Image (cartoon, rainbow, N blue to C red):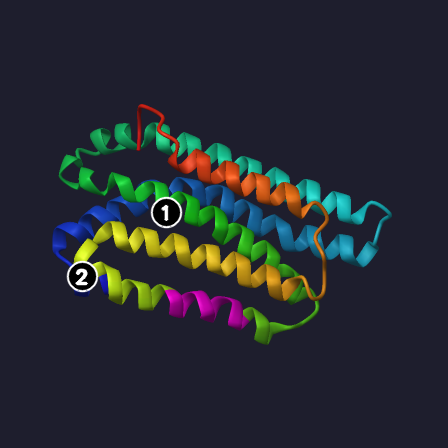
Amino acid sequence: YLLKQLSTGAETGNYVFAVGIASVVSLITQSALTDWPRFFYALMRDNPPDRDAQISRRLLLFLGLHIGAILLTRLVARVAYELFGAEEYLDGIACINYLILGNYFFLLGNIFGTYLGYVKKTHLTFASFAIPGVVNILLNLWLIPEHGAIAAAMTTLIAFVCFAGVSYLYGARYYRLKGMGRVIIYSVLASLAAFVPLGVGA
């Protein structure tokens, strides 16, 4: 909405089409978010001896799948533009890298937020969404008038990184994830997958 109000129709078109291409990775996000609460709550209830290890393995599985989806999306992005005859929106292809990585951190933040749901701290869940939301709006108001669609994509990524960070900080008061170091490594790998030059695609 802010991009439409603060920039040109061409920039809005670039962004909207980029969002459509980047939505491929949301298939992983949606499957993960459908599975995770049921899995997490059951383990917390049954409390098996290897509970924390199981939770860590499942989380890393979803993050690894997401990294694969990031690479796949980048590889097919330019082909998708050609397939849909959307060359007029090709300037927005640079937005895809930010959007697909943002989706990774959106998934991570939602998974961390499950800890807050488990302990019924819904006011903290609200805060974990509200804080990044305010950050996103302020950055959009500042950056979009000059930089257009790419600013909207960058601020989306920043907001979702903030969302993951705030959700983790709040959730860590009630549950400490085992293997957080590996989650950080996966997040670095996701960032590399989103931005390292591939020679094709986005």
Where, quadrant-wise, is the C terminus in this rendering? Answer: top left
Q: Which mark is drawn over residue 99?
A: 1
Using a 10 Å C-alpha cutoff, classify the residue at mark 1 as few (fewer than 14 neighbours), some (14 to 19) or many (20 or more). Answer: many
Q: Is residue 132 magenta?
A: yes
Residue at 63% in and 51% down: 36
Residue closest to the far top: 199
Q: Identify the element where label 1 is drawn.
A: helix
Residue at 75% in and 54% down: 42
Q: Nearer the viewer, residue 184 or 56?
A: 184
Asked if residue 82 is positioned above or below residue 51 in the image, the reply reads above
Query: Given contact means CB atoms under 8 Å apart, are the residues at marks 2 and 1 in contact?
Result: no
The image quadrant of residue 50 is top right
- Whether residue 193 sits left or right of residue 22 in the image: it is right
Residue 169 is situated, as x and y percent measured from the top left of the image, at 61, 63
- Whether residue 101 sits left or right of residue 169 in the image: it is left
Q: Which mark is drawn over residue 145?
A: 2
Q: Amino acid at mark 2?
A: Pro
Asked if residue 173 is positioned above or below residue 27 in the image, the reply reads below
Residue 74 is situated, as x and y percent measured from the top left of the image, at 36, 32
Q: Is residue 113 visible?
A: no
- Whether residue 125 sits left or right of residue 93 in the image: it is right
Q: Identify the element where label 2 is drawn.
A: helix
Give the distance between the C-alpha atoms of the residues marked 2 and 1, in whole angstroms: 19 Å
Residue closest to the far bottom: 123
Closest to the camera, between mark 2 and mark 1, is 2
Q: Which mark is drawn over residue 156?
A: none
Residue range in magenta is 126-135
Q: Is residue 162 visible?
A: yes
Residue at 36% in and 45% down: 98
Mark closest to the chain's N terminus, 2 or 1: 1
